[in-house]
Image (spheres, helix red, strand yellow):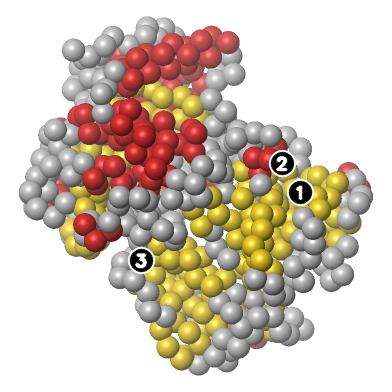
């Protein structure tokens, strides 16, 4: 019997938008900082804990997850003037620390937990100077990503007194001599429109000169010797690398170093004597080696079905560093008791509703029907490629099949693939996902009684859309930090930035497609939906938690017999910087929920 959820008052807000009457019974839950909403969240939290903690699968899963998460994380290597910088988390560490290797000796340069005295203290980004003498490090707490810029001298690890707030999603470029640097910062209290400022060491940030304000195109460019190299999609939807003469920077003077190909160019790094070029081929990494003049020299031998998560090189050194992952092999050693050879990975094709062909990765169980979890993303030009996930290990060990769908909206097959899953074409993404689910069922991997779906952020929108459009296909759904009210999404946090991907409800044409697929507006009273677990963070700086709050209340009232749980993490955001002490319990809740309902 499904436990009765807490009572949620209905206070209907009614408005007419572009001629359509909209009724919103739970708009009051958008006031996430009010005492009433906080009390409601706490009631939901207690209800969720009562249900999840009663599951006998959960406790042993958490123990195993602490082991799998303990195998650690390894970030990309950044070489500078004989030094190497990288982030790593191993063993019982809550967060990755910044490491320095110099003269064969390895040491911790910055431990965010020690620096902040907080287990949620996390390194959001870091940038070494050209000579490796200084490092700028962005550190935040509570998952908010509101990075504060810190400065470290690598000699002795001295932490300088300079502190610059509001540097989330920043970059830092040290100027010659190392006494000043350029950085990106948000004006106080704003989420949009970074400024570029110049900071001189030892001075107050209030004295920093504004170098640039406003909006412009973002270009990935860097110097290699006396040449300016840039990655661009100008005239090349799959991207190319060009050489720009600083004296004649106009596009008419650009020359191709690595021309566009049929495959998407993701990254290029230059060492002192070669170029490494990272392409996507069939949603997997393919790295080629070139001379400095662009001449092809060979291919890097990578594991099959792998992703290069880090490509590190610098014009001052000949060494090149690659960080590589697969679905079953992390960048470091796998966890104890886990043998990757026991969990085959394969890639198959499926066909969407309009005949479009795409890819599906299958990890784990080879034969027979059983518990299966399908995930995807499909948006923002973000590729879905083979990546290690320690949280999936216990599910595989329990006989589960993990399926990852490549969907339109990503950049696996170029800009046209991305555009086919954005704006008025967003429904293509949901159709692709539903077609992948049907393919899994038709090929005997699972049935609608053993198939679950999982997604986060834009992938949470994907799950919400699939859940409301075809609820009979699924036995369980987990929806993390999701967008669900697509008529009002742009009113919160930084969501205005996503208008180019989704469209704006202020535009009558865009409103029509947003309203048509918005999960919050597709819930049908008295229709049976599969068990649903919604997860969000109280301090999410990207997707407002009210999406999950309102959807939970609506689902609980629409069909009380269908289980809908809301898990709200305190002192947590969109997921970045979450410590192991929070990750292990969260992942235990997710995978116990799946295993309990997919059988």
Please tell me whether residue 165 is drawn above or below residue 407 in the rendered image.
above
Residue 194: x percent and y percent? 71, 49
Question: Disc 3 and disc 2: Cα gap in Å?
Answer: 35 Å
CB under 8 Å between callouts 2 and 1?
Answer: yes
Please tell me whether residue 348 is drawn above or below residue 511 in the rendered image.
below
Which is closer to the viewer, label 3 or label 2? Answer: 2
Question: Can the viewer see residue 486 in this picture?
Answer: no
Residue occupying image coordinates x 42% and y 80%: 300
Question: Disc 2 and disc 1: Cα gap in Å?
Answer: 10 Å
Q: Secondary structure at mark 3?
A: loop
Report crowding for label 2: few under 14, some 14 to 19, many 20 or more residues within 10 A (C-alpha): few
Residue marked by disc 2? 115
Question: Disc 1 and disc 3: Cα gap in Å?
Answer: 34 Å
Residue marked by disc 1? 150
Residue occupying image coordinates x 64% and y 76%: 314
**Label disc, if present, on residue 306 of the rendered structure:** 3
Pick whichever of labels 1 and 3 is earlier in the sequence. Answer: 1
Q: Secondary structure at mark 1?
A: strand
Pick whichever of labels 2 and 1 is earlier in the sequence. Answer: 2
Which is closer to the viewer, label 2 or label 1? Answer: 2
Please tell me whether residue 503 is drawn above or below residue 327 in the rendered image.
above
Question: Can the viewer see residue 400 in this picture?
Answer: yes
Please tell me whether residue 508 is drawn above or below residue 169 in the rendered image.
above
Residue 93: x percent and y percent? 55, 43
Residue occupying image coordinates x 51% and y 57%: 74
Residue 393: x percent and y percent? 31, 46
């Amino acid at each position: 019997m499904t436990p009765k959820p807490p009572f949620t008052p209905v206070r209907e807000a009614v408005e007419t938008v572009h001629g359509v009457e909209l009724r919103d019974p739970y708009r009051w839950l958008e006031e996430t900082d009010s005492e009433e909403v906080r009390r409601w969240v706490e009631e939901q939290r207690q209800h969720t804990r009562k249900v999840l903690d009663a599951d006998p699968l959960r406790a042993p899963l958490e123990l195993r997850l602490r082991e799998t998460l303990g195998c650690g994380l390894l970030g990309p290597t950044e070489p500078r003037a004989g030094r190497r910088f990288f982030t790593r988390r191993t063993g019982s560490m809550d967060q990755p620390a910044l490491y320095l290797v110099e003269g064969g000796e390895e040491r911790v340069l910055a431990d965010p937990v020690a620096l902040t005295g907080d287990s949620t203290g996390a390194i959001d980004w870091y940038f070494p100077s050209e000579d490796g003498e200084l490092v700028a490090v962005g550190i935040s707490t509570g998952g908010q990503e509101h990075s504060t810029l810190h400065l470290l001298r690598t000699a002795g690890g001295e932490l300088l007194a300079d502190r610059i707030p509001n540097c989330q999603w920043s970059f830092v470029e040290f100027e010659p001599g190392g006494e000043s640097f350029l950085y990106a910062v948000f004006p106080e209290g704003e989420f949009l429109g970074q400024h570029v400022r110049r900071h001189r060491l030892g001075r107050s940030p209030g004295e920093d000169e504004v170098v640039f304000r406003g909006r412009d195109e973002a270009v990935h460019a860097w110097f290699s010797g006396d040449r300016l190299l840039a990655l661009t999609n100008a005239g090349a939807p799959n991207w190319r690398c060009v050489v720009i003469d600083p004296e004649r920077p106009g596009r008419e003077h650009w020359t191709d170093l690595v021309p566009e190909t049929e495959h998407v160019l993701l990254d290029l790094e230059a060492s002192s004597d070669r170029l490494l070029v990272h392409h996507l081929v069939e949603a997997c990494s393919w790295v080629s080696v070139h001379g400095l003049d662009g001449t092809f020299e060979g291919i890097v031998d990578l594991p099959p079905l792998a992703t290069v998560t880090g490509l590190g090189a610098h014009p001052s050194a000949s060494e090149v560093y690659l960080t590589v992952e697969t679905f079953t092999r992390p960048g470091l050693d796998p966890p104890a008791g886990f043998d990757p050879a026991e969990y085959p990975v394969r890639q198959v094709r499926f066909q969407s509703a309009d005949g479009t062909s795409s890819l599906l990765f299958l990890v784990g169980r080879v034969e027979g029907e059983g518990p299966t979890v399908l995930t995807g993303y499909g948006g923002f030009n973000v590729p879905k490629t083979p990546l290690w996930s320690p949280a999936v290990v216990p599910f595989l060990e329990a006989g589960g099949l993990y399926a990852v769908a490549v969907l339109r909206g990503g950049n696996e097959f170029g800009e046209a693939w991305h555009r086919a899953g954005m704006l008025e074409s967003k429904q293509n993404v949901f159709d692709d996902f539903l077609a992948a689910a049907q393919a899994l069922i038709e090929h005997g991997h699972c049935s609608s009684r053993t198939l679950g779906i999982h997604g986060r952020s834009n992938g949470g929108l994907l799950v919400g859309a699939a859940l409301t459009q075809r609820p009979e296909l699924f036995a369980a759904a987990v929806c993390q930090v999701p967008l669900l009210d697509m008529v009002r999404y742009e009113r919160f946090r930084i969501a205005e930035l996503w208008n180019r991907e989704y469209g704006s409800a202020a535009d009558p044409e865009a409103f029509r497609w947003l309203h048509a697929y918005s999960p919050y507006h597709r819930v049908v009273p008295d229709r049976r939906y599969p068990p649903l677990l919604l997860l969000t963070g109280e301090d999410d700086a990207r997707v407002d938690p009210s999406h999950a709050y309102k959807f939970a209340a609506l689902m609980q009232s629409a069909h009380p017999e269908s289980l809908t749980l809301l898990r709200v993490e305190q002192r947590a955001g969109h997921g970045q910087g979450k410590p192991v002490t929070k990750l292990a319990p969260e992942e235990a809740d997710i995978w116990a929920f799946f295993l309990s309902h997919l059988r």
